[in-house]
Amino acid sequence: MNLVLREDKDEQNAKIENENDIEKENSGYPRSIIFFKAIIAIFYLVIVFKSVQVKIDKKEQEKNYNHFFCFNAMGKLENIYAREVIDYYMDLGVDKFYIADNNDKNAERFSDIFQKEIFDGTMDVIDITGRKKDQTLLYAEMYENFKNECRWLSFFDFDEFLVITENGKNLTIPQYLSNPKFENCDVILINWLMYSDNGLIRYENKPMNVRFTDPLYNSDANRFVKSIIKGKLKWNPWDYDVSPHRPQHHLRTCDAHGDRLKTYNDVVKPPKIDGIYIKHFGIRTAEEYIAKIKRGHPGNLVLYFDERIDNFFHFNNVTEEKVRFFEKELNMTFPKYHYIFKDNKDK
């Protein structure tokens, strides 16, 4: 009997010691910490699940676009430039072009020179002939119409050439946009690099990239940008009557290298033209500049001839030959530039 009682007592003591050991273990690992770790584990699993889901959604989203990159532009009396521009961007990997034909009713047509591209579906020409110009309003319409067709959309002009180089190697647009940093960008802003007239006065039937080879690295206009915009955005980035250089919605905006920007104005300061930029032949020769004046401002901005000539010489050297050419072709005088005349220099 005593032996049985002793065994029961030993068993009870062992049980108590075991409970004490468990309690000691738990006393060094409070329940609050266990609960907190469980929450962290659940949170981590949710993040992993969401990241996997986002990747799946992105792949599905990519399938839903008919085109990876769409070039959007409007033009008037620019057939002499359009072929060079379209061929250039085809070589860069653009797979769809939407061109708004803003010519006068009885003038040239973009369809005259792009019959092949229209036939094979590479290009759609939107007829807005005779319509009063409003570049940003047209951009808004084009984005709304084509945002579900294109993974990315550019809004460039027929004097702008995107240059993309990395480590001395030229990249195509698909290669460039494959950078993972762009996944978190709604808008990519790319700076202009202005070019001078190369001392030329009249138009020559040669490519712009051959005729104009003098970059103006210190030009204040290099702060201006043009936009590449992601498709299927909830808000139309061009809804407001703003600058055609960049949309004004508070979208996730990046520079040409995929770095996020915090400002929402028309400029990127300092200009980033290190390997990725837009060659901007916005001035060209004196003869072509006059034709540009007569076409009118794309945003209906009214500029007087004096202002336009000042703008031309802001980017180009003043010469007597150029001044006299402007005065003859425009049937006007620009006395402020007569200081360059040889007769005045001799006095």
Image (spheres, helix red, strand yellow):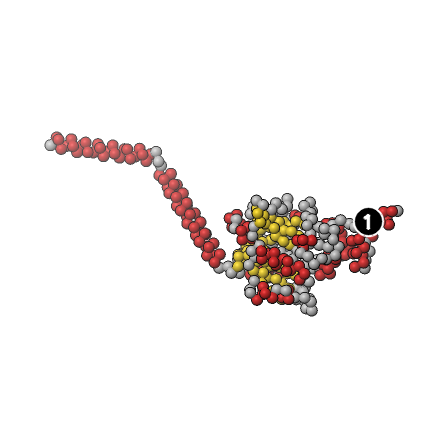
Quick one: quadrant of the N terminus? Answer: top left
The percent position of residue 336, horizontal first and vertical second, equals 81, 51
The answer to which of 44 and 346 lies nearer the viewer is: 346
Give left or right: position of 25 versus 55.
left
Where does label 1 land, which residue?
Answer: 340
- Residue drawn at 61 percent across, 52 percent down: 162
Q: Residue at x 68, y 68 (%)?
A: 105
Q: In the image, is 276 to the left or to the right of 297?
A: left
- The answer to whether 117 is drawn above or below residue 262 in the figure is below
Q: Position of residue 295 (x, y in %)?
A: 71, 61
Residue furthest right in the image: 347
Which of the 4 image quarters holds residue 240?
bottom right
Q: Nearer the viewer, residue 26 or 173?
A: 173
* Rendered image quadrant of residue 229: bottom right
Side of 104 relative to 21 (left or right): right
Identify the residue at image location x=34%, y=33%.
Answer: 28
What amino acid is at disc 1?
Answer: Ile
Furthest residue toward left: 1
**Does 180 appear above or below 206?**
above
